[in-house]
Image (cartoon, grey):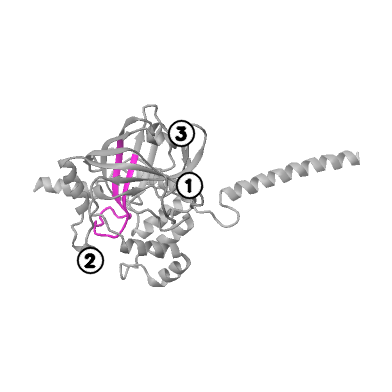
Amino acid sequence: MAMLNRRIFGAFALIGAVILVLLAAFGWSAGWLGSRRISGGDVTAALEANGGGAKPGYRRAHAKGLCFTGEFVANGNGSALTTAGALRAVTIPVLGRFSMAGGNPLAGDGRVVFHSMALLLKTPDGQEWRMALDHTPIFPVADVASFVALQRATTPDPKTGKPDPVRMKPFLAAHPEVKAFQDYMAQAILPNSFANATYYSINAFRFTDAHGATRFVRWQFVPDAPLAGLDKQHLDQLPRDALFREMIARTAKGPSRWHLLLVAANPGDVTDKATVAWQGPHRTIDAGTLTIRAVQPEEVGGCRDLNFDPTILPAGIAVSDDPLLAARSKAYSSSFTRRAGEGPHPSAVGQDLAKDKLQ
């Protein structure tokens, strides 16, 4: 009997130990144990605080935007790298959005910040390829913790309207990649139109071809329009919606075009840090042409209620080992959920255009 009791006790002890392990694993994944992991809500909250508080109904990042429509004509060359249907010889309708970085939808366009382009390509079989691209080839931080820390460090001081140097100095000392990005932005041309900027995927992705070979790829949309820059010394004199109005006027005269260039990684290229640019010559494939034929303010366009999550990908393309991708997906989802529950919003650009018609 004593032997039987010991066996029963041992069995229950083993079961209890397994349950404790499972509970511990669940607690860790939920962020209850150890150092708390950063959620999409944390990122959204940091963006809101940096922008002076929540702006109900608007995106928490890139709040100011303009919808567009057009098509992507793939020439089939991209099939050398991936089986994705969007890169076979096919024409696909495109829905997208131009935007400026920042959480204030009423901010002026005269700022040294990202100019961005988001895209949705949907193939006839229903597969989607969503993209969120910036006009810079690198990103200021490599992980979500650094991104949240950046938002907090650069939150404007209410007294000065500028980041507090007491916060910024130690942050930049701990994040030399942010200082390198600031130096890049200070020297680089700031496009004077959405139509003449090159837009980069920022992150690397995994492309798999018909033979099962997988390689890392970044891509970029290179414009037909020649690059010209804003005068950085007089950005404060630029009308509030100058870039958006320019794009509306330009599109009324004719379409704008970009070539999609797929850039395959070389051995040794860094694929898990968006802060690192790939140097030197790379295998590059011109995979097709993006044409934008019409633009619309968000209240009448189709882009307002879209979440341009860059991890929504077609078969043949997958996320890489870059930790920013999962973080971007969670943050976009959190932002989308919040604004979806806040009701529709009028865009700053749309309000300006409406005033023009009344005058």
Mark 3–mark 2 Cα distance, whole angstroms, equals: 46 Å
Mark 3–mark 1 Cα distance, whole angstroms, equals: 18 Å
What amino acid is found at the position of numbered circle 2 in the picture? Answer: Gln
Q: x, y (%) of residue 151?
A: 40, 60
Q: x, y (%) of residue 256?
A: 23, 42
Q: Quadrant of residue 10?
A: top right
Residue at 36% across, 47% down:
133
Which residues fall within the magenta stretch?
Answer: 94-119
Q: Nearer the viewer, residue 293 or 171?
A: 293
Q: How many marks?
A: 3
Q: Nearer the viewer, residue 231 or 262?
A: 262
**Residue 233 numbered mark, or none:** 2
**Residue 326 numbered mark, or none:** 1
The quarter of the image holding the N terminus is top right
Name the residue beneath numbered marker 3.
315
Structural crowding at the residue carrying mark 3, measured as other residues with C-alpha within 10 Å and reported as few (<14), some (14–19) or many (≥20):
some
Residue 247 visible, this orientation: yes
Kindly check if marks 3 and 2 are in contact, taking CB atoms under 8 A apart as contact.
Answer: no
Residue at 39% across, 47% down:
201
What amino acid is found at the position of numbered circle 1 in the picture? Answer: Ala
Q: Nearer the viewer, residue 330 or 7?
A: 330
3 left or right, relative to 32: right
What amino acid is found at the position of numbered circle 3 in the picture? Answer: Ala
Q: Could you say whether the residue bearing mark 1 is in a helix, strand or loop?
A: helix
Q: Is residue 133 above or below residue 173?
A: above
**Residue 74 numbered mark, or none:** none
Residue 341 visible, this orientation: no
Q: Could you say whether the residue bearing mark 3 is in a helix, strand or loop?
A: loop
Indicate which disc, 3 or 2, sits on the residue closer to the N terminus. Answer: 2
Residue at 49% across, 42% down:
215
